[in-house]
Structure formats: structure tokens, C-alpha cells
Amino acid sequence: GAGVSQSPSNKVTEKGKDVELRCDPISGHTALYWYRQRLGQGLEFLIYFQGNSAPDKSGLPSDRFSAERTGESVSTLTIQRTQQEDSAVYLCASSFSPRGVQPQHFGDGTRLSIL
Amino acid sequence: AQSVAQPEDQVNVAEGNPLTVKCTYSVSGNPYLFWYVQYPNRGLQFLLKYITGDNLVKGSYGFEAEFNKSQTSFHLKKPSALVSDSALYFCAVSPTGNTPLVFGKGTRLSVIA
């Protein structure tokens, strides 16, 4: 039981291809976050799911990026027509936040390389 | 808008010496502040958080952080550094506590034996 699980751990693909990244949050965690970490940079927020509320998509960099979450379980982040600037580590985090301020728990990320 | 600054890209310290990793923040309202550590090829691990109350917050692995409202700072400290503390450290702020975090760019800590 673990922590947040992400797959694949590494993905290499050609420019223009679509990719799908998966995140399994900690069971019972209502909130799920996707972040992007470019080499030598901090983390950039992408999208946030909280329970059954509409997701906060304000961090998605372009319409090539989308994400879904089924209930309070698995989430997938999809990048269409990948570009070289999409190369980064994509990190997923979850938290249990019905009450109080809870830390986010991170997965080990998917390292995406666009050739 | 919220922001976090970590003014040092790299901090070097000798094993056994005290360490400080600096962080300043900008947020409207009361800040919720966090420190995370990242080891190579791993996700971020939570170290500690400040919500309210005592300005000195104690966290995992002997780390602590001091909240200073007048200086808008939240520096990470440890009295005696270990080689195993060598990692990338991130300071983060959340405007409401349970919303997406705004991260600093990270500080690489190297503890030299």
C-alpha cells in the first residue's frame, strides 16, 4: 500500500506521437495533482482534481494536454502531438483533504523524452 | 499571485556542521508553507509544513524550519548535517492549504564528508 504509483517510469517517443501517462493515487485520497518538472527547474502545476468537482485545468500549457480521473482513483495525463519541449518528468501527487491541511504525496514520476 | 524564491542554487556544507537552506515567499493572506526533498530519480518527499502557531516547525529526519512573517521567510535548518542529506530541496507555498503548490526552483544540498 503503498504510495502513489506512476507508469511508465520512462517513456521515449518520437515528436508528433501521442503519449498517455498513468497515476494511481493512494487509496482514499480525494485530491490528485499533476506537475511537470523540467531539467533544472522547479515543479509547474498542470491540473488538479478534487473529489467530484470540476478539475482545475489552469496550469495546462496548451490544448495538446488533457487529463482524466475516474472517481477518486486512477488518473491519466494525455499529451497529443508531442513536441520536444514536452520532454520533462511528469509527477503525480495525491492528498487526503476533507479537513485540515494535508501534505501531498508524490509518485516517482514518468520521465518523458521526445526525440 | 503566489511565488517562492530559493536564492541559492547550491549549498555546500561539511558533515556535522549546521545547514540552512533559504526560502522566501510571497502570498496574499496567510501562507501555508512546505519543504520537500527529492533524491535522484525519485519523487518528492514531504519534510515539514507550517500552517499556524509556533514559528519553529519540526519535521522528518531532524529537519526544522523557522517561519518569519516580517521577513516572509521559511528557512530550512538542521543542527548537524549528514552525507545522506545530500539531495534537492524544494520550498513550496499554497494559498489555501489544500490546493496546488507553487514551488521554488530548488536548492541542491551537498554534504561533504
Image (cartoon, rainbow, N blue to C red):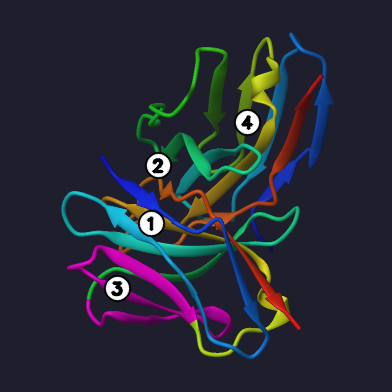
Q: In this figure, which residue is indicated by the disc labeled 3? A: B67
Range covered by the magenta-colored residues: B53-77
- The amino acid pointed to by label 3 is Phe
Q: In this figure, which residue is indicated by the disc labeled 2? A: A50
Marks 2 and 4, how far apart at CA: 15 Å
Q: Secondary structure at mark 2?
A: strand
Q: Secondary structure at mark 4?
A: strand
Marks 4 and 3, how far apart at CA: 37 Å
Marks 1 and 2, how far apart at CA: 9 Å
User: Taking A79 as reference, is A110 above or below it?
Assistant: below
- The amino acid pointed to by label 2 is Gln
Q: At 61% across and 39% down in the image, what residue appears?
A: A74
Q: Give yes or no for residue B64 being in the magenta stretch.
A: yes
Whichever of callouts 2 and 4 sits on the residue coming sooner in the sequence is 2
Q: At 30% across and 60% down in the image, what residue appears?
A: B32
Chain bearing tag 1 is: A
Whichever of callouts 1 and 2 sits on the residue coming sooner in the sequence is 2
Q: Nearer the viewer, mark 3 or mark 1?
A: 3
1 and 2 marks in contact (CB < 8 Å): yes
Marks 3 and 2, how far apart at CA: 29 Å
Marks 4 and 1, how far apart at CA: 21 Å
Marks 3 and 1, how far apart at CA: 23 Å
Q: In this figure, which residue is indicated by the disc labeled 4? A: A76
The x and y percentages for residue B6 are 44, 56
In the depicted view, which residue is nearer to us: B106 or A20? Answer: B106
Q: Nearer the viewer, mark 4 or mark 3?
A: 3
Q: In this figure, which residue is indicated by the disc labeled 1? A: A97
- The amino acid pointed to by label 4 is Thr
The x and y percentages for residue A60 are 47, 24
To the question of a shared chain for discs 4 and 1, the answer is: yes
To the question of a shared chain for discs 1 and 2, the answer is: yes
3 and 1 marks in contact (CB < 8 Å): no
